[in-house]
């Protein structure tokens, strides 16, 4: 009986693993290179959204009066640096193939596509721009936001009523334009689609502490530079193990750099070219899950809960959002005429912006999605983790596969990923006069700082979630020197001019900037 039971257990395990492999979709496992999970045309990612959380039913008598949107740019092409990496990969593979032939080594196990592979971006001079898929993502997002909140977007357009703000990085500003075209489509007089002109504004890269706070924060730049080697050290054993596995499986002398580049190629082929049967097919489902985890771990440590600085530097954005809500409430209380005050503040930036803001709200703590009722007490771990955030302590690493985890880059900050905070005005018989609803990628999401609900009284939202972060001053935190010397030597100015001239438009020059 024991032997029979063991055999039965083995058969059940094999059947279960086989079914899991069939259900595995690599498009769910690309970390922050995942395309928008809300885009209907890309329905393969619909299952990555956590369906265990039961959203709050908006009470009768509650209507939205203001919306804050913080969105990442849409799907983009690889940067010049990354394109050169793929060209180096192609050159190295050719060298390995040549060496194998000279030594009369068998190449029978090497996939046929790899024998003649060239980078799809070979010879391309520029990169990092918004892809046509990214344009569609943001355009459709604009359409959906208008359809979901018709009471907020039923007034004549004015830039003071619907301000659209973006960073000066072209893929972000292009995303803002695509969103605006969807949001205001049919409401103008331009062309057959009746588009209308709208304003998109941005701060200088050097001073944009609201949307590119990470690029203006010297403390963060120093932290990132000093901790990147530690992150690589954590990833190294997994990369080494997968390198060894692939070298044995295909009888080909892959290096660790090859594996890293092939994983990057897998993500680019899937996202931009809809190809999943080339680079991605080199890896087993287990290997893909582990590679995804290494990406998620890097985001966690260098952009997320791994260091409180990662999200504390986003306080200017949080202050901007609270200010806009306070102004909307004042306009409501003062009975200002409709169309005379701001109804939505729409922002377009980068993965670092969305990740930091999500952390400020306390989103994606392990276990919070398991709350099912409004104002249900969060799990013990959620409460502990949220308290650690309030105390600015680093959280534990995301659980390693095969364990499940809430922190996944494909959900936290995919292309076109976004957070929306919707301010509601409720009738006098409500428990509170104003509420804030949190939406992530257009889905209601639990806020552990507000009893693990997505619909939080505004006073509680400010007191429990926002106020603890507002004690920080950005300039002090980031070592911003506001007392610039009045005069500088002329040679220094001349040197800066030459540096600027020779670095303009050239991403070959090393930079601490992180532009996702």
Image (spheres, helix red, strand yellow):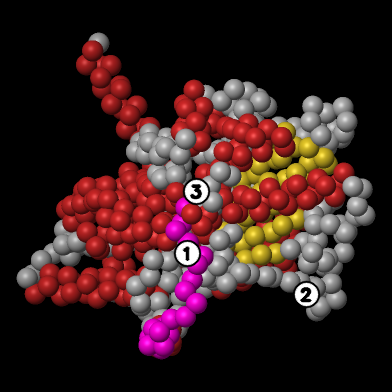
Q: Residue at x 68, y 47 (%)?
A: 322
Q: Residue at x 88, y 59 (%)?
A: 340
Q: Is 116 placed above or below 434 here? A: below
Q: Does the CB distance between marks 2 and 3 fall below 8 Å?
A: no
**Disc 3 to disc 1, how far (Cα)?**
21 Å
Find numbered disc 1 in the image and state the secondary structure of the residue it sits on: loop
Q: Is residue 469 visible?
A: yes
Q: Which mark, residue 481? A: 1
Crowdedness of circle 1 by 10 Å Cα count: few (<14), some, many (20+)? few
Q: Is 426 placed above or below 249 here? A: above
Number of marks: 3
Q: Nearer the viewer, mark 3 or mark 1?
A: 1
Magenta residues, dominant SS class: loop
**Disc 2 to disc 1, how far (Cα)?**
39 Å
Q: Which of 415 and 191 is in front in this view?
A: 415
Crowdedness of circle 2 by 10 Å Cα count: few (<14), some, many (20+)? some
Residue 455: quadrant of the picture: top right
Q: Residue at x 52, y 70 (%)?
A: 206
Residue 136: x and y in percent read 63, 65
Q: Residue at x 81, y 78 (%)?
A: 190
Along the polypeptide, which appears first: circle 2 or circle 3?
2
Residue at label 3?
A: 311
Q: Is residue 192 left or right of residue 453?
A: right
Residue 194: x and y in percent read 82, 73
Residue 342: x and y in percent read 80, 57
Q: What stretch is highlighted in magenta?
A: 477-496
Q: Which of 516 and 185 is in front in this view?
A: 516
Along the polypeptide, which appears first: circle 2 or circle 1?
2
Find numbered disc 2 in the image and state the secondary structure of the residue it sits on: loop
Residue at label 2?
A: 197
Q: Is residue 103 left or right of residue 407?
A: left
């Amino acid at each position: 009986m024991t032997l029979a039971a063991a055999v039965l257990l083995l058969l059940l395990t094999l059947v279960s693993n086989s079914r899991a492999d069939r259900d595995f979709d690599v498009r769910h496992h690309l970390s922050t290179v995942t395309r928008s999970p809300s885009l209907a045309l890309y329905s393969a990612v619909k299952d990555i959204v956590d369906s265990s959380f039961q959203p709050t039913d908006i009470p009768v008598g509650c209507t939205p009066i203001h919306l804050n949107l913080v969105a990442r740019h849409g799907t983009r092409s690889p940067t010049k640096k990354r394109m050169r990496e793929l060209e180096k990969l192609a050159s190295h593979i050719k060298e390995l193939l040549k060496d194998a032939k000279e030594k009369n080594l068998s190449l029978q196990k090497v996939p046929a596509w790899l024998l003649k592979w060239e980078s799809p971006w070979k010879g391309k001079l520029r990169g990092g721009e918004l892809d046509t898929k990214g344009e569609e993502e943001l355009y459709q997002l604009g359409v959906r936001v208008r359809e979901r909140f018709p009471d907020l977007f039923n007034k004549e357009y004015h830039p003071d009523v619907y301000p659209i703000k973006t960073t000066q990085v072209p893929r972000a500003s292009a995303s803002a334009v695509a969103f605006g075209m969807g949001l205001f489509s049919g409401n103008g007089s331009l062309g057959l689609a009746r588009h209308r002109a709208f304003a998109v504004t941005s701060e200088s890269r050097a001073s944009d502490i609201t949307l590119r706070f990470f690029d203006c924060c010297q403390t963060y730049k120093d932290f990132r530079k000093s901790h990147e080697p530690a992150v690589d050290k954590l990833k190294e054993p997994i990369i080494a193990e997968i390198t060894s596995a692939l070298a044995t499986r295909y009888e080909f002398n892959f290096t660790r750099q090859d594996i890293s580049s092939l994983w990057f190629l897998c993500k680019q082929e899937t996202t931009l070219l809809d190809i999943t049967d080339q680079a991605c097919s080199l890896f087993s489902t287990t290997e893909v899950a582990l590679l995804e985890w290494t990406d998620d771990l890097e985001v966690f440590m260098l952009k997320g809960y791994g260091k409180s600085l990662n999200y504390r530097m986003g306080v200017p954005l949080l202050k901007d959002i609270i200010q806009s809500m306070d102004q909307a409430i004042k306009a409501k209380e003062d009975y200002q005429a409709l169309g005379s005050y701001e109804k939505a503040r729409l922002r377009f930036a980068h993965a670092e912006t969305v990740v930091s803001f999500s952390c400020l709200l306390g989103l994606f703590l392990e276990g919070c999605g398991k709350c099912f009722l409004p104002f249900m007490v969060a799990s013990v771990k959620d409460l502990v983790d949220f308290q650690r955030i309030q105390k600015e302590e680093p959280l534990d690493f995301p659980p390693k596969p095969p364990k499940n985890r809430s922190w996944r880059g494909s959900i936290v900050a995919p292309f076109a990923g976004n957070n929306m905070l919707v301010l509601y005005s409720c009738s006098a018989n409500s428990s509170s006069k104003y509420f804030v609803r949190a939406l992530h990628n257009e889905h209601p999401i639990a806020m552990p700082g507000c009893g693990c609900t997505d619909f939080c009284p505004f006073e509680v939202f400010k007191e429990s979630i926002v106020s603890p972060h507002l004690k920080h001053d950005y300039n002090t935190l980031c070592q911003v020197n506001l007392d610039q010397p009045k005069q500088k030597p002329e040679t220094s100015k001349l040197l800066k001019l030459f540096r600027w001239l020779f670095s303009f438009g050239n991403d070959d020059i090393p930079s601490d900037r992180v532009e996702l």
